[in-house]
Image (spheres, rainbow, N blue to C red):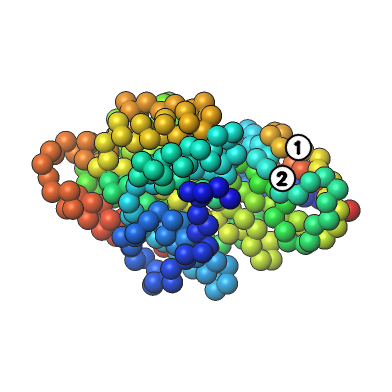
Amino acid sequence: LADIAIPEGLWDAVKTPEGIVANWFYREGSTVPAGATVAEIMVEKTNYEIAAPAAGTLHVLVPKDGVVRPGTVIGRIA
Amino acid sequence: MSRGISDPLLTAPPLRPRGHSWSLDSAEAGLALETAAIEELARSGRTPVRLVWQCPPALIVTRTEARLSRFAQAAEALRARGWPVLVRGSGGGACPLGAGTVQCALVRVLPSGTSSIEHMYGAMAAWIRRPLARLGIATSVGSVPGAFCPGNHEIVAGRKKIAGIAQHWRTGSAGSHLAIATASINVEHDPESLAAVVNQFYRLAGGSHRCLPSALTSVRAELARPGRERDGLMRACVEQLHADAPR
């Protein structure tokens, strides 16, 4: 398993407590290649694209519009 | 992809040396320039790229707004009225560009864990505020209720939005990040027309945001020097942006 996580320290969670998952580019259960952009996070007018850390099957843990913070694991690659 | 939306990768012009500015034929070319800068930085190294550009009228919106229920119809209607609608990679909301605005962008490679979106906002805000200060405009950083593309890192003059900043980050090589911060400064566009096109877009596309003209200002309005030659004011802003570009 490989976590798809929002990097710690990407933003100051004291100043901006939350972001959201703006989009998933693959559906639950899809096969994704390593390095593919799988999701997009939006926080304070910043879009952050998250790449798949490995190839495999995507499992979504935080759905679209779900609230996230730095360090949140939003999905896994199995 | 709906009619009226363009892929900036298709028309990317060659990059010129760093720190130059462009007067472009379209906003599409400007977005392409930014995309090309990111790609160049991803390939070639760690030296920041700085861009300054201008373009004819266009409304640049986020990918989220491109999913509004009547987006395609809104884009078509605005295109017919001289405001092509383009989708950008950064966050925020609909942002009108035109002959009276100037755009700047800062592209950096950031090793993982060494920087945050706040650092990039800070670098961009400093870049924009220094030239405005040289022109005699005192600014602060904050939010402006009722402005288009609202956020907490707006450049504010007299409690009105004079410039806005947005960002787009993606994963680079070896755990690094590729980050682009972009800004649009209203040099001499009248607030009423900017608010009108933003409100027209949301009304037609099915969005709920509304912009108040009273929340917006421009360099010309803040300087309160009517009759000053337009080209001179814009040129002064562009030159000051180059002089103060972050290294």
Question: In the picture, residue B146 is in which quadrant?
Answer: top left
Which residue does the image show at 26% across and 36% down from the upper left?
B190
Q: Which residue is drawn at the image coordinates 43% and 68% (left, top)?
A: B13
Q: Nearer the viewer, residue B125 or B54?
A: B54
Say if mark 1 contacts mark 2, CB within 8 Å: yes
Q: Is residue B226 visible?
A: yes
How many C-alpha atoms fall within 10 Å of the one at disc 1: few (<14), some, or many (≥20)? some
Disc 1, SS: loop
Q: What kind of residue is marked 2?
A: Trp
Horizontal placement of A16 versus A37: left or right? left
Residue drawn at 54 percent across, 38 percent down: B71
* Image position, residue B61 (x, y; %): 49, 43
Q: Label 2: chain? A: A
The part of the image, by quadrant, that contains residue B218 is: top left
In this rendering, is residue B187 above or below A65? below
Give the left or right position of residue B215, taking residue A10 as reference: left
Tell me: A57 left or right of B4. right
Q: Position of residue B51 (x, y in %)?
A: 39, 60
- Quick one: label 1 or label 2, which is nearer the N terminus? 2
Residue corresponding to mark 2 = A24
Residue B92 seen from this side: no
x and y, in percent, of residue B150 in the image: 46, 34
Image quarter (top left, top right, bottom left or bottom right) of the C terminus of chain B: bottom left
Q: Which residue is mark 1?
A: A63
Q: Amino acid at mark 1?
A: Pro
- Dot 2, how many residues are within 10 Å of its Cα: few (below 14), some (14-19), or many (20+)? some
Q: Nearer the viewer, residue A66 or B243?
A: A66
